Image: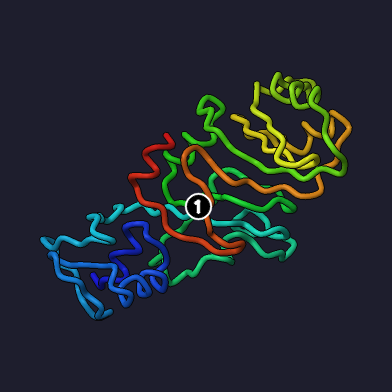
Amino acid sequence: MRINKYLASCGLGSRRKCEEYITAGRVSVNSVIVRELSIVIKDNDVVCFDNNPVLVSGEYIYILLNKPKGVVTTCDDEKGRKTVLDLIDKRELEGKRIFPVGRLDYDTEGLLILTNDGDFTRKMTHPSSKVKKVYVATLDKNIIDEDLKTLEQGIEIEGEKTHPAMARNIKSNVVELTITQGRNRQVRKMFEALGYKVVYLKRIAVGRIRLGNLKTGEWRFISKEDIKKLC
């Protein structure tokens, strides 16, 4: 396996990003720094990135995408709109068919996981999983402390009360909200129930996985070790 492909399979990023790591001297094979992109990794080779051993994730692939606004979370769209799959370089997938884990609505940005692992997807999207999802919401007006407490206690939307959440002010009209459910447009509806309109919404974390410095529209592979922390 070519070294850039090997590193990408370990969850370090796209092949192009891994090539940058190689030429920067951050990768070693059998304790020797390598900079040549033509190197082929053999079964017994020990590959390290920044002096830390890295291993191939396996047959399943996991991708972290920073979804932009105006992109639909689906594999195909009957209206011809851009989908999250359109943002992924198909050459990196080696013919594997991936799909999104859960949803982010059309107007919401941020962290979205894509994979070809059906069992993982079912675990993550099942109501019993209670995986924490962290959003940052910009509102049309300043929020009061009493409403923050109400968000944390749970709000009735569409005849059903939401699970307890965590809410904190970042600015007067910007709130970080952590929920453990995945109801349709839940975050927007929770704020609407209190009389606020969400003018900008971004998901910044799912469980222990965070967006970090991943730019809008960019993506990278996630290692299997990080995925194990989620389910």
The residue under the point 38% across, 44% down is: 226
Relative depth, front residue between 197 and 113: 197
The residue under the point 55% across, 43% down is: 205
The N terminus, quarter of image: bottom left
Left or right: where 130 falls relative to 110? left
Relative depth, front residue between 153 and 94: 153
The residue under the point 67% across, 65% down is: 82
Residue 15 image point, x, y percent: 38, 70
Residue under pointer 1: 114
Position above or below: 107 against 142: below
Left or right: where 200 falls relative to 99? right
The amino acid type of the residue labelled 1 equals: Leu
Label 1 neighbour load within 10 Å: few <14, some 14-19, many 20+: many
Left or right: where 149 falls relative to 15? right
Q: Quadrant of residue 157?
A: top right
How was this image coloured? rainbow
Residue 174 image point, x, y percent: 75, 42
The C terminus, quarter of image: top left
The residue under the point 51% across, 49% down is: 113
Residue 22 image point, x, y percent: 30, 73
